């Protein structure tokens, strides 16, 4: 009988126990993801034989814009002659980024490191004739302050044991008809990933190209568990058929706050991932900054791409954008690192984030206000408003704070031109308690004095 009661008690407690273990797993993940959530800005690097600048990375031969032979002839121009990894890392750090992700291998199969698993690498098949990944990783570690991410393409179009090669045209073979051939390719991918893991032990893997096969076909869970067995703290993006940790919208900041808790928008500075000679469509520093703040306000990161040339030099327009981001971020540090998503639109004209405790609302003004900035629908009392990176305390007035109404009053903050940052001014709205919002549509009178 006693056993029976215990059994009933366990059944009753079941959902609770399950819920608890789910939350614990979520908490453990949150701890693992913390550096990523706090980082806000990462710098992406696309570097490979395509960096000579005539054609797009890998896609050029896949889409038939150039023959495979001409595409691979670019190997002779990948010299890395002026490659200065210490300078790369300095420039990246100066941007304010807290992590960097480099293409260890793109869809063309050209590996930047001395891979033993395959034939195609900077060592064996380029004018550089040397491993160009290790010196970068060494510099990242030596200078510190940056987490290391490795981009790895699951696709390797040129390989004979990879099924697809050209977009138009038949596949080389069908993986279900020739499972050994496919298994051979998967072994190659695992071997390369093991090499990367052993040699570099990165903080993050950035997979790409998963769309050509399913999770099961790639053995994505197998890859992920292999990497996690070696490094339980590793962060993996979602482009491994959803088996990773965070989402990667591309070339566009989400219009509404994504449902997923962790995400990162990857973004080119011009229109290309790798260096392209004819691409002059560089985004201005102001544009990139706006995108960064937009991402932050919706709880995400910006992974901003640079495309060094085949000789290892980074185009000046890109360096300039990174420097300008760095200037703005270092001035506004407290409103960047460690913040979290802000409040929904409608309360204030500008982007917002919150500090971890939730009692400072940061308001980013991508325009110069005319005298005042209004904040409405804030139930928590405002203690004071100051200008981040400047220290000036601003005058605040509260209007329509009516005691019979549940609609909170509206705050009007006076913002004189003298406190403005020429790119984006940030106000720290300090509250007496963690932020509470009013989200209604007004109240009619029920009482008056
Ligand atoms: C895309 C492309 C690729 C680029 C990547 C970066 O998936 O295949 O060329 O490297 O996005 O996000």
Image (cartoon, rainbow, N blue to C red):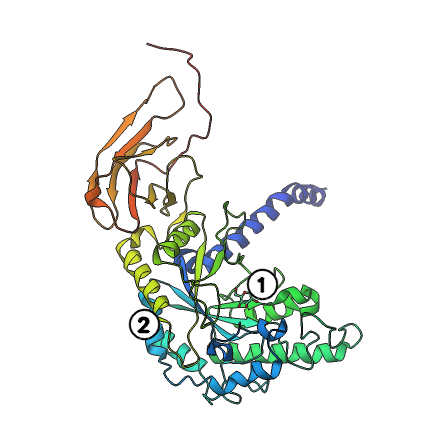
- Residue ID for mark 1: 239
Rendered residue at 29%/31% (across/down): 412
Q: Is residue 68 left or right of residue 216?
A: left
Horizontally, residue 43 falls left or right of residue 189, namely left
- Of the pair 117 and 373, the residue shown nearer to us: 373
| Extreme-right residue of the structure | 177
The Cα atoms of the two marked residues, 1 and 2, are separated by: 29 Å
Residue 313 marker: none
Instruction: Name the residue rendered at 41%, 53% in the picture.
Output: 291
The residue at label 1 has a CB less than 8 Å from ligand 1:
yes
* Image quarter of the C terminus: top left
Tell me: residue 273, above or below residue 256: below
Q: Does residue 201 appear anywhere in the picture?
A: yes
Disc 2 marks which residue? 90
Classify mark 2 as within 8 Å of ligand 1 or not, answering yes or no: no
Instruction: Name the element at disc 1.
Output: loop
Residue placed farthest to the front in the image?
A: 278
SS for dot 2 = helix
């Amino acid at each position: 009988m006693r056993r029976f009661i215990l059994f009933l008690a366990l059944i009753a407690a079941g959902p609770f126990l399950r819920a608890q273990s789910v939350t614990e797993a979520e908490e453990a993940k949150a701890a693992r993801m913390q550096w990523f959530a706090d980082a806000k800005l990462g710098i992406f690097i696309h570097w490979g034989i395509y960096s000579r600048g005539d054609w797009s990375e890998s896609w050029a031969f896949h889409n038939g814009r150039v023959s495979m032979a001409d595409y691979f002839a670019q190997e002779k121009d990948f010299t890395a002659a002026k490659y200065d990894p210490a300078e790369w890392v300095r420039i990246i750090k100066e941007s304010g980024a807290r992590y960097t992700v480099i293409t260890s291998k793109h869809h063309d199969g050209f590996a930047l490191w001395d891979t033993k698993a395959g034939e195609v690498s900077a060592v064996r098949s380029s004018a550089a004739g040397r491993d160009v990944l290790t010196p970068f990783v060494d510099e990242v570690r030596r200078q510190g302050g940056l987490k290391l991410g490795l981009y790895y393409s699951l696709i390797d179009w040129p390989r004979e044991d990879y099924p697809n090669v050209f977009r138009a045209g038949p596949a080389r073979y069908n993986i279900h008809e020739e499972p050994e051939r496919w298994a051979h390719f998967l072994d190659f991918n695992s071997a390369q990933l093991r090499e990367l893991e052993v040699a570099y032990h990165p903080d993050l893997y950035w997979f790409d190209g998963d769309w050509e096969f399913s999770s099961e076909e790639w053995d994505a869970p197998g890859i992920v568990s292999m990497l996690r067995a070696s490094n339980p703290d590793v962060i993996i993006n979602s482009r491994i058929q959803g088996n990773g940790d965070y989402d990667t919208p591309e070339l566009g900041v989400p219009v509404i706050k994504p449902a997923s808790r962790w995400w990162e928008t990857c973004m080119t500075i011009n229109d290309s991932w790798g260096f392209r000679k004819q691409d002059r469509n560089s985004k201005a520093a102001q544009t990139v900054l706006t995108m960064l703040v937009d991402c932050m306000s919706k709880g995400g990161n910006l992974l901003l791409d640079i495309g060094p040339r085949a000789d290892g030099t980074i185009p000046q327009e890109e360096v300039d954008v990174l420097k300008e981001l760095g200037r703005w971020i270092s001035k506004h540090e407290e409103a960047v690192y460690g913040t979290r998503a802000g409040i929904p639109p409608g309360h204030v004209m500008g982007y917002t984030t919150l500090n971890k405790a939730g009692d400072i609302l940061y308001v980013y003004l991508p325009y110069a206000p005319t005298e005042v900035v209004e904040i409405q629908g804030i139930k928590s009392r405002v203690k004071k408003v100051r200008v981040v990176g400047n220290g000036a305390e601003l005058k605040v007035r509260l209007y329509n704070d009516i005691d019979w109404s549940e609609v909170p009053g509206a705050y009007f903050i006076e913002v004189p031109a003298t406190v403005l940052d020429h790119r984006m001014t940030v106000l720290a709205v300090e509250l007496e308690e963690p932020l509470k919002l009013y989200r209604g549509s007004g109240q009619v009178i029920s009482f008056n004095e």
